[in-house]
Each structure stands twice: as C-alpha cells, then as structure tokens.
Image (tube, rainbow, N blue to C red):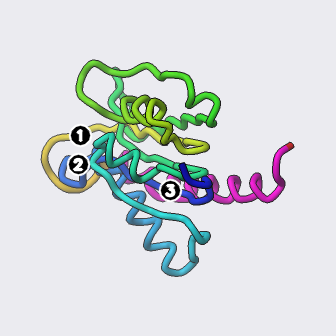
Amino acid sequence: MGTHTRIAVIGIGTEFRRDDGVGWAVADRLLQRAANRALPPGTVVATCDGDPARLIGLWEDAALAVVVDAAHAEPGHPGLVHRIEFDAERLARPPATSSHGLGLGEAVELARVLGRLPGHLVVYAVEGADTSVGAGLTPAVEGVVEPLVASVEDEIVRHRVARAKGPS
C-alpha cells in the first residue's frame, strides 16, 4: 500500500449513452480549466467505464478520490446532484451493494477487502434523464456540469487545507 498522497478525480460512465456521460464531461471540463490554472501536483483526472478493477486501480493509494457518476432514481429529478462522503473509517465498513451487475458499490467493497481504498472518497451522483444510446447530455444534466467542476475543485482545496493543518 502506498503513502496516500495523491488525489484522483474519476468520471464514470460512457459518453455514448447521453446522461451517463456526465462524469466524463466533468473530467473533460476540469482538464480544460487546468490548462489555464494547474491542478495541484499529484492530482490525476481520469475517466472510467465503472469497471471495479479499473476504479480500484485509479483510486488506489489516493489520499482523496472524487468520483462523478450518473445515477438513476425513481422518481427521477434530472440534474439533481447527490454528494456522498466517506472517510477511511466509514469506508472500512461494508457498503450495501446491488445484485444487478457491478458498479461503484461493488468497487468500494472489493477495494475494502483488498486493502486498496482511498483515504477519503467523495461521490457526486447526478440524476439523469436519458441514458439511451447517443451523444450529448440533456439540458438538465448539462446545466450541472460547470457547478460540479467548481465543486470538485473545492473538494481538492478543502483536502489540501485539511492536510496542511494536520491531525486535529
């Protein structure tokens, strides 16, 4: 296990299933903004299809992992953003998992068993309107991309400030 110093920002989904591409859109915009204002050293921005092994590889040894993913809710509120935060202690407890395929919950559980959890995990789950085959986000989801990029940047700043202060 590493020293847990880096920061991983991971956009989950696919850009070919409409709103399922919100994680990719946030990662892309974050990288565009970083061209003018560099991200802190050790910050990695990546995209992933949600495969648990790939997710674990992306957040392994990260002090902070910020994940952006599309979510399905019934009834849905397209564009509604849910922020879920876990520290290392809460991540050490098994989360509830779905019996329908593998996803973020299963990746967290597998990483816990393997001892490959990030020190701190923040998940932004965005309720989508359309995950059919096609490119482009629906207007409701597109409207939250820029605020989400700002939120991810704020997570990185808060993390760095907290680390600079040290343990309380």
Kind of residue at disc 3: Ala
Nearest the viewer among 38 and 151 is: 38
The image shows residue 147 at horizontal and vertical percentages of: 52, 54
Q: Is residue 165 above or below residue 85?
A: below
Residue displayed at 27% across by 18% down: 99
Q: Is residue 80 above or below residue 65?
A: above
The image shows residue 70 at horizontal and vertical percentages of: 35, 40
Where, quadrant-wise, is the C terminus in this rendering?
top right
Report, in whole angstroms, how far the alpha carbon at label 2 lies from the one at label 1: 6 Å
Pointer 2 residue: 18
Pointer 3 residue: 8
Are the residues tagged 2 and 1 within 8 Å (C-beta)?
Answer: yes
Question: Mark 2 or mark 1, which has the lower sequence index?
Answer: 2
Kindly give the residue lying farthest to the left in the view shown.
133
Are the residues tagged 2 and 3 within 8 Å (C-beta)?
Answer: no
Q: Is residue 16 magenta?
A: no
Question: Mark 3 or mark 1, which has the lower sequence index?
Answer: 3
Kind of residue at disc 2: Arg
